[in-house]
Image (cartoon, grey):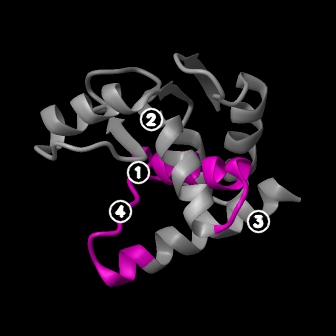
Amino acid sequence: MECTVHRTVRGAPSERWVLFVLKTLAQHVPARLRHRARVCAVVFVGDARIRTLNKVHRGIDRPTDVLAFPFDDAKRDDSIGDVIIAVPQVRQQAKRFGVSFKEECARTLTHGVLHLMGYDHAHTVEARRMFALQEAAVKDILL
């Protein structure tokens, strides 16, 4: 998978690390999705930017850790969409969950990309499938 990485805040992971995460995740998703998921963008932002995006697109006036904006296949050739990650939120979650920033960032990035690939967690069965895939990928990323 090709990926454009935009790092707008200090402490954001490197492009190389993001590509490693995506490559590892690709090994866990079904082949039919791997072929569809060719290009995406990952943008690392601060709390103010993610809060604005969350308010505009979801009507929730507070920061969140990750937002995924999938593209309609008819509108874009190879791109599946954008993942926006709030570095300060990921840092707070890592501390709250007692894990490293790198682990929580891998989890957040994986979660966002899975949404771009069509996974969701609105229903119990979907959630189990998505989170199992997410955690299997994170485990391999951390090896």
| Amino acid at the residue labelled 1 | His
- N-terminal of the pair, mark 2 or mark 3, is 2
Q: Position of residue 65 (x, y in %)?
A: 43, 47
Residue occupying image coordinates x 64% and y 32%: 1
| Amino acid at the residue labelled 4 | Asp
- The residue labelled by disc 1 is 115
With respect to residue 116, does 84 lie above or below? above
Contact? badges 3 and 1 (CB < 8 Å):
no
Taking depth in this image into account, of 18 and 73 the one nearest to the observer is 18
Contact? badges 2 and 1 (CB < 8 Å):
yes
7 lies left or right of 68: right
- N-terminal of the pair, mark 2 or mark 1, is 2
- The residue labelled by disc 2 is 83
Instruction: Give the label, 2 or 1, closer to the camera.
Output: 2
**Residue 33 visible in the current orientation:** no
The label on residue 120 is 4
For numbered disc 3, what is the local secondary structure? helix
- The residue labelled by disc 3 is 139
Residue occupying image coordinates x 24% and y 44%: 62
| Amino acid at the residue labelled 3 | Lys
Residues in magenta, as a range: 98-127
| Amino acid at the residue labelled 2 | Val
Question: How far is disc 3 from disc 4 in space, using C-alphas?
Answer: 20 Å
Question: How far is disc 2 from disc 4 in space, using C-alphas?
Answer: 14 Å
- N-terminal of the pair, mark 2 or mark 4, is 2
Question: How far is disc 2 from disc 1 in space, using C-alphas?
Answer: 9 Å
Question: How far is disc 2 from disc 3 in space, using C-alphas?
Answer: 21 Å
- N-terminal of the pair, mark 4 or mark 1, is 1
Instruction: Give the label, 3 or 4, closer to the camera.
Output: 3
